[in-house]
Every structure is written in structure tokens, then in C-alpha cells.
Amino acid sequence: MVQMSARFEKLVKMPADPVAKLLSRANVILKTPLEAPPTAQAGVVLEELDRKGALVDLLRLLAVLLPPRERVWWACLAARDYIGPRSDQDPASLTASEAWVFEPSEENRDKARITLDHAYVDDDTVNCALAVLYAAGTLGPGELNQYPAPAGASEAAAFAMNMVALGQLSDKFEEHGGVLIERALDIARGGKGQVVQVPEAATHS
């Protein structure tokens, strides 16, 4: 039996449910065939995907495993990777989503929803706002709360935001992919996701 790397331990923010169950609930299918049993928990499956170099599936699974607030924060940090530090020129969807992370109220959720109506067609940070909008598993705040959101909608938006960041920084695809993963793992351990480089042990030859 392969001993699990410390990278995938103490992920206290992630649910203890079997990954297979969580993927099914979010309507997500990984493209990488898994050797881990259906009862395997987060750390075991993440370790296997990492060992197989399955970067995209790692990001797809991390979007499912992170709780709503942490998931949105992870997406916001990915947007910041190419938008840059906060400024007066920031897209409204990103600003509203960050505000929701700091204060996840229904009022801030509604503000994130409103930005979707006014966003430019090429503004990919709407993925952050979508992750906020569907974070509670419903279609939105107010009357929309009584209607369920599409399965895995918030997760899909957070995954999409990370893939956009990866595309924007495609000149260092593997390196930045590692940063996105380490960031999610840090957040899952209770950190703030302030990862700027991948630890040497996390790189592949």
C-alpha cells in the first residue's frame, strides 16, 4: 500500500464522504480511470490523480471537494492571477464575489447575481459570480432560493474560472497548474491560499 503524501493530509475543510458519492452528487465524471475503491476519501483520490499527472481532473475534483465559501475564494484567486491586484478597474463580478467571501450574506449574493446582467461578454470573472449565485445549491437569493440549482453548478463555475486562469497563463501551464492545486490544498487545510510557487516535492519530472 502506497503511503499518502503529507500534501494530501489534514484537508480539514473537505468532506469525509467518499469521493465517488460527492462526484455523483455534483454530476461530475472524471476522465482519468481510478484505481481507488468507491469508498476512497479525498486524500487518496487526489494522491492518485497527482501521481498520474491528471492536472485537469485534479482541478475538477478540487472544485467539488472545497466547501462553497472556500470554493469561491479559490476561484477569485484564480481570477486575480491574470486580472492583477485590486484596482478601480476590477470587473464587478470579481469584486462582488470577493465581498461575498468576506461576508457571505444573501445581500452580497444578490449583488453578485446582479453583476451577471451587466458583465461584458468577454468577462470570464462571471464564473466567480456564478459560483456565488449557486453556492447554496439553489438558483439564487430571495424567491429563487426555493428552486434547486443544477447539480454541481457552483463547482463547475469555480473549475471554469481556474481553467481560464490556466489558459491566460498558458506560457507556464504546468507550473501555474501546480500553483492552482497547491492553493486549493492550502485552503482545504484552513489557509488563505496564498501560494506563489509549487513546493519542489510537488513537481513532476
Image (spheres, grey):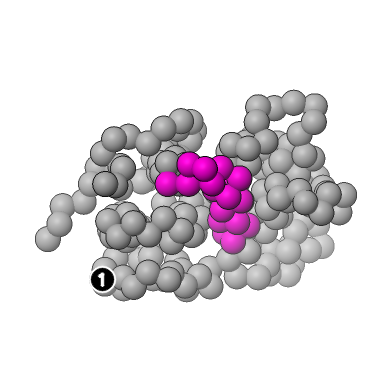
Placement of 105 over or under 113, stated as above or below: above
- Residue situated furthest front in the rendering: 171
Left or right relative to 180: residue 3: left
Residue visible at 42% across and 41% down in the picture? 175
Q: Nearer the viewer, residue 170 or 112?
A: 170
**Residue 125 forms part of the magenta stretch:** no
Please provide percent x and percent y for residue 55: 41, 55
Q: Position of residue 190 (x, y in %)?
A: 43, 37
Q: Label 1 is placed on what type of residue?
A: Glu
Q: Quadrant of residue 35?
A: bottom left
Residue at point 47% right, 72% down?
29
| Image location (x, y in percent) of residue 3 | 16, 52
On the rendered structure, is 77 left or right of 112?
left
Task: Give the left or right position of residue 126, taking residue 44 as reference.
Answer: right
Q: Secondary structure at mark 1?
A: loop
Q: Residues within 10 Å of mark 1 (few under 14, many from 20)?
A: few
Image quadrant assignment for residue 191: top left
For label 1, the residue is 35
From this viewpoint, is residue 141 visible? Answer: yes
- In the image, the segment drawn in magenta is 155-174
Image coordinates of residue 60 in percent, x first then y, are 48, 59
Instruction: Count how many numbered circles sit on residues in the image.
Output: 1
Quarter in which the N terminus is drawn: bottom left
100 vs 58, left or right, is: right
Residue 102 position (above or below residue 55): above
Q: Is residue 135 visible?
A: no
